[in-house]
Image: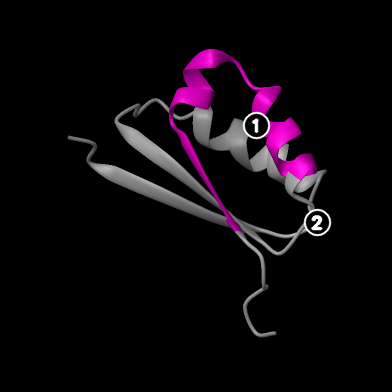
Amino acid sequence: MTKIAIITRTKDRSVFLPRAIKTIADQTYGDYIHVIVNDGGNESEVEAIIASQNDTVQSKIKLFHRSKPSGA
């Protein structure tokens, strides 16, 4: 069972999201799941960013799209 969940909320952050993913993937502790919540941003853009990651990183990511952003 995975011990740690890291949750990243994003919306139209095509520059920052890859950096956040890399920062998490570069940590020495590897027993984690990275949950990315796309908070109403461009779905295909977020999916492309995740698809550009290597297989190991992709296997740790779970993506959720919110059709209506929080606070809307």
The correct choice, above or below, for 19 with respect to 54 in the image is: below
Residue farthest front in this picture? 67
What numbered label is drawn on residue 12? 2
Which numbered disc flags the more N-terminal residue, 2 or 1? 2
Q: How is the image coloured?
A: one colour
Q: Is residue 57 left or right of residue 71?
A: left
Residue 71 versus residue 25: which sits nearer the camera?
71
State yes or no: discs 2 and 1 in contact (Cβ < 8 Å).
no
Q: How crowded is the residue under tag 2: few (<14 C-alpha within 10 Å), some, or many (20+)?
A: some
Looking at the picture, how far across and down is residue 56, in whole percent? 48, 17
Q: Secondary structure at mark 2?
A: loop
What numbered label is drawn on residue 50? 1
Q: Is residue 62 left or right of residue 54?
A: left
Among the 4 quarters of the image, the one containing residue 33: top left
Residue farthest top in this picture? 55
Residue 48 versus residue 30: which sits nearer the camera?
48
Residue farthest left in this picture? 1
Q: Secondary structure at mark 1?
A: helix
Among the 4 quarters of the image, the one containing residue 46: top right
Which amino acid type corresponds to the residue marked 2 in the rendered image?
Answer: Asp
**59 within the magenta span:** yes
**Residue numbers of the magenta segment:** 44-65
